[in-house]
Image (tube, rainbow, N blue to C red):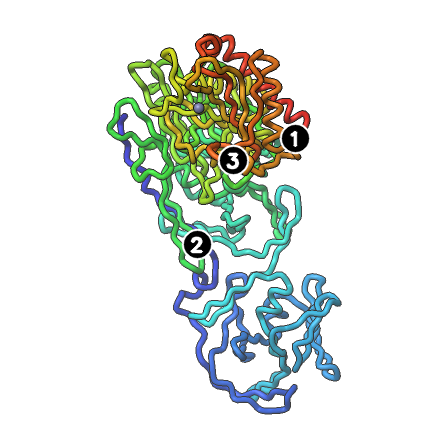
Amino acid sequence: MKKTIRNTLFLLIIAVLFSFLALPKKASAISLSFKYKDITNDKTVTYNGVSPLYYINGSLYNNGTQNAIITDGYAMAPICVFTEGCGAEYSYKSSKKRITLTYKGNTLILYAGSTKASYNGESVTAPISSVRIKYSDTGETTCLVPSRFVAETFGMDYTWTQSTGSVALFTPIELEMDGEQFLYAGTYGKLNYNNTAVDNDTTPSYIVNDNALICLKTISKAIDGLRYDYSSKKKTLSLTYGEITIDMKLGSTDCYVNGLLTICPEAPHYITNPETGKGHVYFPGRFVFETFGFDYSWDSATSWIAENETTGIYDPDFDFMLVYDPDSDTADDAQAGEEHDPSSSASVPSGRRSSFYQMLRFPILEGVRTDLIGIHDDLWNDLVYFDLPGNYIQFYQDNPIVNTGEAVKQVQILYYEDADITRIKMYTKSDDSHVILSHKDLMTDKSMVFLFDKPSCLFDKIIVLDAGHGGEDPGTQHGGYNEKDLNFMIVYTYCRQLFDQSDIKVFYSRYTDYLVPLHDRPTLPARVEADFFVSVHHNSVYSTLKNGTEVYYSVKNTGNFNGLNSAAMASMFLGNLVTTLKTERNGTFGARNYVVVSEENDVPAVLLEIGYMSNPAELKRLVKASFQKKVAKVIFKTVKQIYTTYGR
Ligand SMILES: [Zn+2]
């Protein structure tokens, strides 16, 4: 694959806090010394200290000679900050020492000399008393009120910066977002592009759910090569830069990057400012510009600078491997694939979603039978994979997968020449508590869509099936047969065929012939949020005469599923197995020891011993595909019976 040089455009957004506005950062409150008469307590005070500055909606408010003070760590503002500065109404009744402030229909009453207060008739407590004062040099009379308390009570955004002795106050404004009113009291973002300010006085960036939303009109004028198509009728927004196209819909976090379904952290919105009457389309800045390959930084009061991230194809000197990795340092620009029609995508259930939720869509070459593709969850490696017959390396070079979500850590596409298969691997992230990310696949004729999330967010009924032994542990061996292979055929070949067609999600302890440590198997149900656990084994004794079916459970396991415990589950399985298979009924056994897989489970758990491989006559039946299919059918029917009887 040929490599291209990464984009080096630079986009910077600066929060419009006081320090970035009209006055440079070094503008600070200075220490003052002045006298005032404390009317409330009838004494003259000489104030020596910092007089806080108030920046209101980004501009320094000029409170003239009416200085603010700091008392016991509280910034105390003269009333004019809220009246002239913010538009509140004010009255003072000296006989009751009552200060009445009205702002946007809300009334806050404070008292000079008291922390008693009320807001819209409900009593509240101010952190410090207000005072009625008269400045000695000018003779002006006002009240000093605790400014954070007043501001926050009225729903304003209030930030104190110690180093500059400054208060940044933002008054809430009524905005209309996608037709609904909401009160916005956040900061107003300002855009810098290639170190040049982009004028956006009337269309600032808004912070919604911690995401800066950027005005389409403002930014599209500033960036050459950024093309957009907005349909007010369909409420769709299509953004194109270079060879990447992002298709979005107002109010929806589902979007398409070069036709690949993904999730953006915040939906694009149509935001109208009723004060100006003007509305504009806004989109999540970081998501869009990082997808396009820009460097993007958000600089707030804390001067936090984002890491630079890139998306694209990473090609480590390996001819037959493609990696789509959002975390890689070096990345080629993704090549544009064919335009995909977003409306042709598979329908995706909404509802339960965790913070892991991600969609990933793979284009599939026309003619490939997606219904024949088997999907494997390799839980031990946090891996979901599927195989396509033939070599698809070139196809995915031409139709790249852009993986911008959080759940999928990396996508690898490998071609195995011996087997002539292309394996598509999706490595998922697990969180600290080891919750496994699961997937649910939806097939369409042109693509496969994978949903990644916690299992319980995608499935109602979840169980674990464990094929006993594996790898270097063959289990019991008789007549040239290994127990591990019989267990695997029943569980992963035949049971899987049945469960794949049902609404019951099964997680398997193994997907190939490898050894899962005994003590790891019981940890699966908790990781995948399973309802119960079934392990499949075959038996053996020294006598060649012993035959029949047994079901084990542990008396130490107290797992309970809607009233079903391990003992009751063992009886159900035994009854169904011996009836269908016509094997000897040896019974259920509540073991005190040795049954690690059922004992260490927190959910009802059983271990099936289907029959005796040490009995030559029984072994003959056990190795037959028709018999193994019957066993699988019994397991499937019993699981369904449990859900019918016990619910879910
Ligand atoms: Zn065994």
When the figure is inspected, residue 270 is found, relative to residue 24, above or below; the finding is above
Horizontally, residue 1 falls left or right of residue 215, namely left
Viewer-nearest residue: 272 or 32 = 32
Q: Which dot, 3 or 1, sits closer to the camera?
A: 3
Viewer-nearest residue: 142 or 482 = 482
* Residue drawn where x is 54% and y is 74% of the image: 75
Q: Which residue is mark 3?
A: 592
Q: Which residue is mark 2?
A: 14
Helix, strand or loop status at disc 1 = loop
Q: Which residue is mark 1?
A: 648
Q: CA distance from mark 2 to mark 3?
A: 66 Å
Helix, strand or loop status at disc 3 = loop
Crowd rating for badge 3 (residues with CA inside 10 Å; few <14, some 14–19, many 20+): few
Horizontally, residue 511 falls left or right of residue 78, namely left
Residue 254 is at least partly visible in this image: no
Viewer-nearest residue: 497 or 151 = 497
Residue 220, position as x, y percentages in the image: 46, 40
Callout 1 amino acid: Arg
* Residue drawn where x is 36% and y is 31% of the image: 324
Is mark 2 in CB contact (under 8 Å) with mark 1?
no
Horizontally, residue 133 falls left or right of residue 197, namely right
Q: CA distance from mark 3 to mark 1?
A: 30 Å
Callout 3 amino acid: Arg
Crowd rating for badge 1 (residues with CA inside 10 Å; few <14, some 14–19, many 20+): few
**Which mark identifies residue 190?**
none
